[in-house]
Image: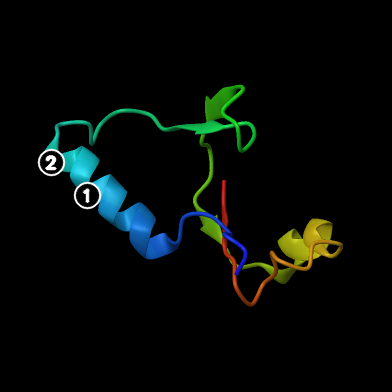
């Protein structure tokens, strides 16, 4: 099975842990790629809009049925 990355439930648990550590008011930076070669600020929340998945049409592992867009 292909690892598609962190799921929403896992992100929720990670966020809860950071809030408990006192980091709830900090801004979120996300990686530019899967190797962490750079980072940028997270500006948007989740979207399920089908139009936003059009750029993923060529990707057979990431689609609207098994993914949701964050950012």
Q: Secondary structure at mark 1?
A: helix
8 shown above or below 66: above
- Residue occupying the far top of the picture: 38
Q: As drawn, is 70 to the left or to the right of 23?
A: right
Give the image location of residue 42, x and y in percent.
51, 36
What residue lies at 56% left-to-right and 25% top-to-bottom?
39
- Quadrant hosting residue 38: top right
Q: CA distance from mark 1 to mark 2?
A: 6 Å
Q: As drawn, is 58 to the left or to the right of 22?
A: right
What residue lies at 64% left-to-right and 34% top-to-bottom?
33
What residue lies at 73% left-to-right and 60% top-to-bottom?
52
Question: As rendered, which of 39 and 51 lies closer to the eye?
Answer: 39
Give the image location of residue 2, x and y in percent.
62, 64
Question: As rendered, which of 65 and 6 lies closer to the eye?
Answer: 6
Q: As drawn, is 28 to the left or to the right of 60?
A: left
Q: Which residue is mark 2?
A: 20
Q: Which residue is mark 1?
A: 16
Q: Secondary structure at mark 2?
A: helix
Q: How many marks overall?
A: 2
- Quadrant hosting residue 10: bottom left
Whether pointer 1 and pointer 2 mark residues with C-beta atoms closer than 8 Å, the reply is: yes
């Amino acid at each position: 099975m292909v690892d598609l990355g962190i799921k929403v439930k896992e992100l929720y648990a990670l966020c809860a842990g950071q809030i408990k550590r006192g980091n709830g008011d900090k801004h979120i930076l996300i990686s530019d790629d899967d190797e962490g070669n750079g980072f940028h600020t997270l500006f948007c929340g989740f979207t399920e809009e089908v139009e936003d998945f059009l750029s993923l049409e060529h990707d057979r592992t990431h689609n609207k049925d098994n993914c949701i867009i964050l950012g």
